[in-house]
Image (cartoon, grey):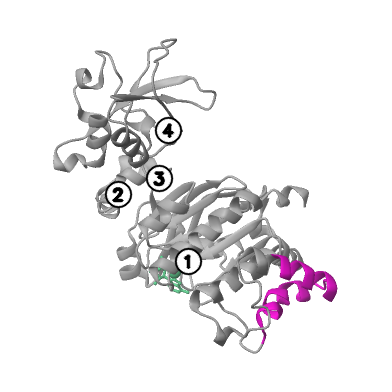
Amino acid sequence: MADIQSGGIRIQHLYKIFGPKAASHVEAVKNGMSKADLLKETGHVLGLRDINLDIPAGSIQVIMGLSGSGKSTLIRHINRLIDPTAGEVLIGGVDVCKMGFRGLREFRRRQTAMVFQKFALLPHRNVLDNVVYGLEICGVKRSESVATAMRWIERVGLKGFEQRFPNQLSGGMQQRVGLARALAMDAPVLLMDEAYSALDPLIRMDMQSVLLDLQKEIRKTIVFITHDLDEALRLGDQIAILRDGCIVQQGTKQDIVLRPADEYVTNFVKQVNRGRVVCVESVMSPSRLGVASAGNQVAAGTTIEEAISMLTHNPAIEQLTVVGSENQPLGTVNLRQLACALITSEEGCDASRMPAEELGRADAPVAVSRV
Ligand SMILES: Nc1ncnc2c1ncn2[C@@H]1O[C@H](COP(=O)(O)OP(=O)(O)O)[C@@H](O)[C@H]1O
Ligand SMILES: [Mg+2]
């Protein structure tokens, strides 16, 4: 059980086929039968094909994809609302699919919490009693559960609204209640299936900030589903992109934006403001070992937009030295390199395609990915 607590998730060779004889079609799917052929020839629907995903404890994994790509099917395997046709779902090393009825019930109550798109609040209960609800079911004493609930209500910014009923709250406030209710359970895994998709854009950004702020402290393993790329890039430590039940790419936001795996991903990232996503170390000219550059420094992890702002506010500075966590110089970057990185290669200018001399040295490896 202690192992489960750690909350890391590993999904291995997961397949889901919907239909009465699902298991008998796994081999055909493993041998490459397409979703369309499976449906045409057998009447079965391919939900997921060979999903492999490692989600470190305490990180935010975003799952992205168009409608029908399998996002909900995937997240529902994590608390086994759906049984896989083949494969494993390990939480803290324990296979969820092998749990018995009681083990599964305990696991769902104590190890995972969900936040729903449509809030799913109980209409006849006020805010406090909605947040207390899960604790009540687990048999926590009223005084204790109220104290816990009040703490989370305050943390999501709803202090003073404890006695209101859901129909007296805006959508954003209702989702804050949903989040407080999930967090009150103190489960290591938080599952959020399009939790913010029904919210207006500004409220949605507010809620993203609330989650990011809280996460600094709570360090939950969060699986967050969205079909919105901006949301994915803002929240995800790791992003996985689903198409027709397959993961077509997984990686950091930099990986996805700078090196989209195929046209489907390219179409997703086309409209992205790269300046807010790509970091200076991805476009710098790496330093020769031991050569410390003088001048103004910028920390690795700084976005291109921030670096451009530094340079344009200080016209006397021609380039910045990118430094690592121990202040060691990693490379240099100038305004031209930064500006080029904003433009996609399709449009003809890409820092990774600039001639080496532009990058300041003859033997410069030109693009360095951030790990
Ligand atoms: N219970 C079910 N029975 C049959 N097909 C299903 C079932 N649930 C989902 N599907 C199908 O699986 C695919 C993925 O669905 P879903 O996971 O809901 O996608 P998403 O959440 O990305 O919109 C779709 O083709 C959907 O029609
Ligand atoms: Mg869905």
Q: Quadrant of residue 167?
A: bottom right
- How far apart are the alpha carbons under marks 1 and 2? 27 Å
The amino acid type, in three-letter code, at marker 1 is Ser
Magenta span has 133?
A: yes
x and y, in percent, of residue 268 in the image: 29, 54
Residue at figure coordinates x 66%, y 67% from the top left: 154
- How far apart are the alpha carbons under marks 2 and 4? 18 Å
Kindly identify which residue carries mark 3.
253
Kindly identify which residue carries mark 1.
72
113 left or right, relative to 242: right
Q: Which residues are magenta?
A: 125-151
Say which element carries label 4. Answer: loop
- How far apart are the alpha carbons under marks 3 and 2? 12 Å
| N-term-proximal mark, 1 vs 4 | 1
Say which element carries label 1. Answer: helix
x and y, in percent, of residue 263 in the image: 24, 50
Q: Main secondary structure of the magenta part?
A: helix
- How far apart are the alpha carbons under marks 1 and 3? 21 Å
Foreground label between 2 and 4: 2
| N-term-proximal mark, 1 vs 3 | 1
The amino acid type, in three-letter code, at marker 2 is Asn
Marks 1 & 2, CB-CB < 8 Å contact: no
Kindly identify which residue carries mark 4.
370
Say which element carries label 2. Answer: loop
Outermost residue to the left: 348
- How far apart are the alpha carbons under marks 4 and 3? 10 Å
Callout 1 environment at 10 Å: few (<14), some (14 to 19), or many (20+)? Answer: some
The disc label shown at residue 58, or none: none
For label 4, being within 8 Å of ligand 1 is answered no
| N-term-proximal mark, 3 vs 2 | 3
